[in-house]
Image: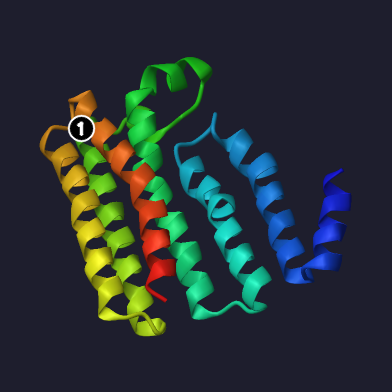
Amino acid sequence: MGGSGGFGVAWWVNLPVAVLGAISILLYAFVYTPLKRRTHFSTAIGAVPGAIPPLAGWVAAQGSFSVEAWLLFALQFVWQFPHFWAIAWLYHDEYAKAGFRMLPYAGASAEVTARLSLLYTLMMVALSLLFAPFTTLSWLYLLGAITLGLWVFGAAYRFVKAPQLPQSARGVLISSVLYLPLLLVWLILST
């Protein structure tokens, strides 16, 4: 079934998008999934297939691997870390029972998890600001991206200040869930 879908994408969209889809499926199913029980680095590996869909969408719509396409990929890639680490922190007992080796349970303390979440949040906000010099976006985009960035940074900073509190990790989770779609809608509205 998946193979016929890949041929359909290659035929009706383009070959690069079909290849990206195949890479995403293969990495997720045959690399990321088995590694979840072996190493906490599986999160980084799983972030690659998680970031391919926006790249594929851009290539499907524009027909090229432009700077904007790679910025979307990088933004989605980096976004997954604070988002997923917050989930893994909140549900660390469940992940441990299932045998998954996630960062909060791979010997890293809550403080380390919170600091890494803050670092990746800063990278995510910086990436969001890079859209302006590489596109025709106005200062209005920058204003919205900075506002959203300060908000999501605030949640990550509160996690660093109180890493033992579930509401701190939950704040990162909620802000990350809202941040990316709000930023992308703002990006579209600002063009």
Q: Nearer the viewer, residue 55 or 97?
A: 55
The quarter in which the C terminus is drawn is bottom left
Q: Residue furthest front?
A: 189
Question: Percent from the top left, x then y, of residue 78?
Answer: 40, 55
Question: Percent from the top left, x then y, of residue 120?
Answer: 31, 53
Q: How is the image coloured?
A: rainbow
Q: Quadrant of residue 150?
A: bottom left
Q: Amino acid at mark 1?
A: Ser
| Mark 1 residue element | helix
Q: Nearer the viewer, residue 69 or 82?
A: 69
Which residue is the site of mark 1?
168
Query: Which residue is located at x 74 percent, y 63 percent?
Result: 19
Query: Which residue is located at x 33 percent, y 29 percent?
Result: 89
Q: How many marks?
A: 1
Query: Which residue is located at x 20 percent, y 43 percent?
Result: 155
Q: Is residue 106 visible?
A: no
Q: Nearer the viewer, residue 4 or 109?
A: 4
The quarter in which the N terminus is drawn is top right
Query: Which residue is located at x 51 percent, y 41 percent?
Result: 42
Question: Percent from the top left, x then y, of residue 4?
Answer: 89, 51
Question: Percent from the top left, x then y, of residue 77?
Answer: 46, 56
